[in-house]
Amino acid sequence: MESINIVEGLGYLASGLVAVSFLMKSINKLRLVNTVGSICFVIYAVAIHAIPVALINLFTVCINIYYLTKKDVSKQANKR
């Protein structure tokens, strides 16, 4: 049996995290887990020289971070 190398393992981890993120009931948890999975995909894609995959996942990370911080800012504004 052939063992999985670190890069391939990172790809499987990224896939699992992104898949599990869609099972979350809370949108914040979904975005957080999805962000971690997408960051893993960026690293994986760079390692295997798949730049289009890295770019779309980097875009996903940016969108998730934007909405996670936007929600935090709007919650703080509503408390004032």
Image: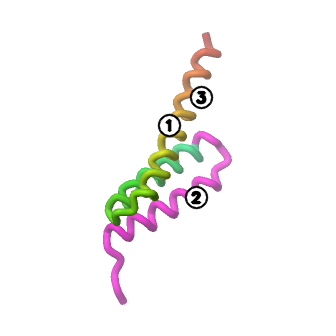
Q: Quadrant of the C terminus?
A: top right
Query: What is the spatial separation of the Cα atoms under label 1 and label 2, in whole angstroms?
Result: 18 Å
Badge 1 density bin: few <14, some 14–19, many ≥20, Cα 10 Å: some
Q: Please say if the residues under marks 2 and 3 sit with CB atoms less than 8 Å apart.
A: no
The tag earlier along the polypeptide, 2 or 3, is 2
Q: Secondary structure at mark 1?
A: helix
Q: Identify which amino acid the numbered label 1 is placed on.
A: Ile
Q: Identify which amino acid the numbered label 2 is placed on.
A: Val
Query: What is the spatial separation of the Cα atoms under label 1 and label 3, in whole angstroms?
Result: 10 Å
Name the colour scheme: rainbow
- Give me the disc on residue 71: 3
Residue drawn at 35 percent across, 77 percent down: 4
- According to the image, label 1 marks what residue? 65
- According to the image, label 2 marks what residue? 20
Q: Is residue 15 shown in magenta?
A: yes
Q: Position of residue 56 (x, y in %)?
A: 49, 52
**Chain part drawn in magenta:** 1-28
Residue drawn at 34 percent across, 86 percent down: 2
With respect to residue 47, does 65 lie above or below? Answer: above
- Give me the disc on residue 31: none
Q: Identify which amino acid the numbered label 3 is placed on.
A: Lys
Q: Position of residue 40 (x, y in %)?
A: 41, 55
Residue drawn at 50 percent across, 37 percent down: 65
